[in-house]
Image: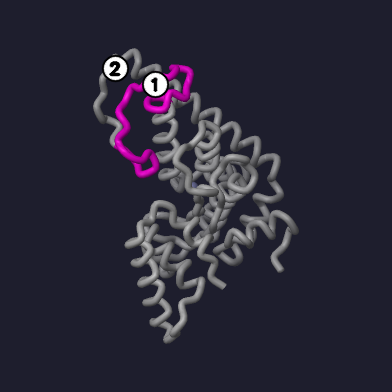
Amino acid sequence: KINLEDISRRTPGFSGADLENLLNEAALLAARENRKEIKIYDIDEAIDRVMMGPAKRSRKYSEEEKKQVSYHESGHAILGVKLDNAETVQKVTIVPRGQAGGYAMMTPDKETFLQTKSQLLDTIVGLLGGRVSEELFIGDVSTGAHNDFQKATAIARAMVTEYGMSNLGPVQYEKPTGSVFLGRDYMSDKNFSDQVALEIDNEVRRIIEECYDKARVVLKENELLVHLIATHLMEIETLTKEDIYELVETGQLS
Ligand code: ZN
């Protein structure tokens, strides 16, 4: 069954034309298997393609890499489930796609006009969860968190310089330059002294460090769940939101 609400939740910011493209892509996938009907997994695959690029099935992980990626993604997933203000995990997978080794698709609970400080902080905590999980449960860290850090830093920096959500107070140091979630140019209109630049950097670092600590606490508290999700990822590669909640609630998949 195809749940339209789920689809719209997983495609935040998509325009009508984007959604049309998405359905065309899904129809092509169905046609490729000589099916006249679009199934939910066609839509799944189409969303992944549009957002992350085509799957790289031919690329094979070593067992060590598979474990590393599984624990990384499991960390994101568990924080998505356990944090009050984090985004919802829609899907988590270790199938490589585009530039990503694996990924956890997180989307806001509902589309909102505003984001609160607690939501932004929990989003950062969730982004750092991949690296923290590798550190806690593998004992070595990988380059897999590169993109997470970029996003987390961009959000923390916007909190300090644009949204007045730090110890530097409600002062705007930088002009908004579009969505913080799409990456940004750090060298944008800078009109503050080196001293202030230093204070901004320190505040950004403090926010990131506090979020990192929170991720560590929550993942330690839920260590068994992290192992459970990671083990299943190593075995079946992709878990949907429903799978994740079933595992968290019952400890197994039916
Ligand atoms: Zn990650």
Please report the residue visible at 49 percent of the width from the left and 24 percent of the height from the top.
206
Q: Position of residue 63 (x, y in %)?
A: 54, 60
Number of other residues with Cα within 10 Å of mark 2, as a class: few under 14, some 14 to 19, many 20 or more: few
Looking at marks 1 and 2 on the same chain, the residue that comes earlier in the sequence is marked by: 2
Vertical order, 135 against 58 (above or below) = above
Q: Position of residue 177 (x, y in %)?
A: 30, 35
Q: Can you tell me whether the CB of the residue at mark 1 lies under 8 Å from the nearest atom of ligand 1? A: no
Q: Position of residue 229 (x, y in %)?
A: 64, 56
Q: Which residues are magenta?
A: 160-184
Q: Position of residue 33 (x, y in %)?
A: 43, 83
Q: Nearer the viewer, residue 184 or 146?
A: 184
Disc 2 marks a residue whose amino acid type is Phe
Is residue 47 within the magenta segment?
A: no
Disc 1 marks a residue whose amino acid type is Ile
Secondary element at image label 2 = loop
Please identify the residue farthest to the right as the structure is shown: 250
Report the disc number at residue 230. none
Q: Is residue 175 left or right of residue 42?
A: left
Quadrant where the C terminus lies?
A: bottom right
Residue underneath mark 2: 192
Number of other residues with Cα within 10 Å of mark 1, as a class: few under 14, some 14 to 19, many 20 or more: some
Vertical order, 124 against 67 (above or below) = above
Is residue 179 within the magenta segment?
A: yes
Vertical order, 27 against 171 (above or below) = below
Residue underneath mark 1: 200
Tell me if label 1 and label 2 are in contact, CB under 8 Å: yes
Main SS, magenta region, reads loop
Q: Nearer the viewer, residue 110 or 233?
A: 110
* Alpha carbons under labels 1 and 2: distance apart: 10 Å
Please report the residue visible at 32 percent of the width from the left and 32 percent of the height from the top.
176
Secondary element at image label 1 = helix
